Amino acid sequence: MLNEINLAIVGHANVGKTSLLRTLTQDSQFGTISDKPGSTRHVEAITFSLSNNDKIVFYDTPGLEDSIALYDYISRLNRDYTKADGIDKLNQFLSSPESEHRFEQEAKVIRQLLKSDAAIYVVDIREPILDKYHDELAVLAYSDKPILAVFNYTASSSPYEIEWKKLLSRIGIHTIVRFDAVFPSLDGEYRLYQSLLLLLEPAKNILNGWQEKIKQQRLNRNHRASLAIADALIDVAAYSELAKDNVEDMIKIMQDNVRKREQQAITELLSLYQFSIAQQSSENLPILRGRFESDLFNREALKLMGIHLSKGMLSGAVIGAGVDLAVGGITLGSAALIGATIGGLAQTAKHYGNRIRNKLSGHTKMTIDDAIICFLSLRLLQLKESLNLRGHANNMPIILAKLDEGTWKKGKLPKSLQVTRVHPSWSTIGRYKLKKDDANRQEVLSNVARELE
C-alpha cells in the first residue's frame, strides 16, 4: 500500500485549477486566481499529513496555454521514431531545447504529471470543444498516469457537457466527476474521492483517511463556530450600563459596543473557516469589510428577518428587555423589594438589591433588548451556515437569505441565554472585568452552543 499520494491538477489556463484546489484544501488564500491567462506560473504544492505518516500532496500546475503548437512540436520530434510510445514522446520533448524556452510552462506541467500518481484534469464545462483541447488531451494521454476529469462550474447550465464526455471517452478518459469549485454540492467532494479510489486502489487507506480527516475538521469547525457565536451572544445578553441624565449618550455607546462585538464575531468566523473579508455588495445583509452592511439596530433589517420590536424602544434605540424604566417613580420589581425587606426576606432582598439601589440613586440599568440579541444570533447563524456550504474558490460577497420561522426569530431568548441577564460580569463589553475562569459561564456557553447546533 502507498504511504503518499501525489496528485497533479492539470488543464488549460483559466479553467479553475487553483479554484478547485482552494475548495479541496479549504484554503481561500492558496495560489492566485485571476481572469487573466497564466495566473499560475509555477508548480505549487500543498501537503497534508495524515496518521501513520501517510501524506497526500496536491500540485497546482500552470495552464497548458499553447497546446496546438506543443502537440505539433512533439509530433515532429518523434517523426523518425515510429515505435516510440507516449512516455518516449514526452521524454523526448523534455530533453529538447524548446522545453526550456517556448514551451517552458507546458514542460513544467508534463514533468509534474510524470512524477505524480494520478492527474485531475479540470474542464470548464461552459467552454465549447476547441482544437486546443483535443491536442492538450492527446499530450496528457501520452503519460501512463490515470486521469480523473472534473467538470467545473457545473452550477451554470452548459450545452457542451455531452460533447466533452465524448471527447474524453475518445482519449481514453472514462472517469468523470461534476464538481463546482465555487458552489460545491454536499456530496461532490465525496464523489470526487470515490472516483479517485477507482483509479488508485493501492491508495485506498490514504484516501479514506483523508476523507475522514476532512469530515472531522468540518465537525470540529462547526462546533467551534457555534461556541464563537454563543460567546458573542452571552457578551451582549449580559452587557449592561447605568445611566442617569445621559440616557441618549449611553444608548449610542451601547449600540456602538454591540456593533463592535458583532464585527469581532464575524471576523472570528471568517478566520475559522479561512475566508477573507467579503467584498462590498448592496444586496440583502452582505458582509462589508468585516461587518454587515445593514446595521444591527436598523428597524427595516429587523423586519426583513421577521424580528418584532419589543416595548423597550427609546429614542430610536431598541434596548430594554432587562431595563426597569420607572413609571410613576417605582416599578413592580422595586415594590416587591420593599415588601420583601419589610418582611425580613433577606434572600429576596439580596436578589433585588442592586436593582433597587440603582433605582434609588437615580440610575437606570440599561441592557440590550431580546429582539436585537435574537437578530444578532440569526445573522451569525446564517453566516456560519453559509460558510459551511461555501467553496473556498468563491470570492463573491456573502449574502444571507431570508429565514423561515424558527425559535430564534420570535424575539424571545431561550432559557439557556436568559440566565446571563443577571450576570453582567460575564460580559467582555460591560463595565465589569470578565471572569474568564467562571465555571458557570463556561457551562452556559456550552449549553447555548448546543442549542444553536
Image (spheres, grey):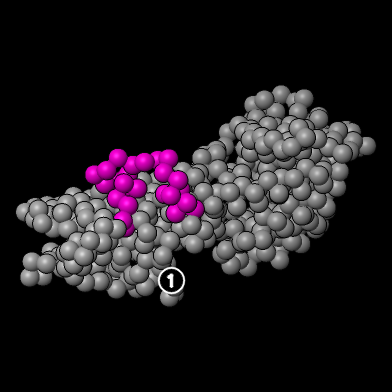
The residues colored magenta run 421-446
Q: Position of residue 104 (x, y in %)?
A: 65, 30
Of residues 441 and 90, the one drawn nearer to the viewer in this rendering: 441
Residue 185 in sight in this render: yes
Judged left or right of residue 369, residue 277 is right
Q: Position of residue 373 (x, y in %)?
A: 33, 61
The residue depicted at 29 percent of the width and 50 percent of the height is 424
Q: Position of residue 418 (x, y in %)?
A: 36, 62
Q: Residues within 10 Å of mark 1 (few under 14, many from 20)?
A: few
Residue 430 is one of the magenta-drawn residues: yes
Of residues 27 and 366, the one drawn nearer to the viewer in this rendering: 366
Of residues 165 and 227, the one drawn nearer to the viewer in this rendering: 227
Q: Secondary structure at mark 1?
A: helix
Judged left or right of residue 138, residue 229 is left
Amino acid type assigned to the residue bearing label 1 in the image: Thr
The residue depicted at 76 percent of the width and 28 percent of the height is 94
Which residue position is annotated with label 1?
407
Which of the 4 image quadrants contains residue 75?
Answer: top right
Q: Is residue 349 above or below residue 308?
A: above
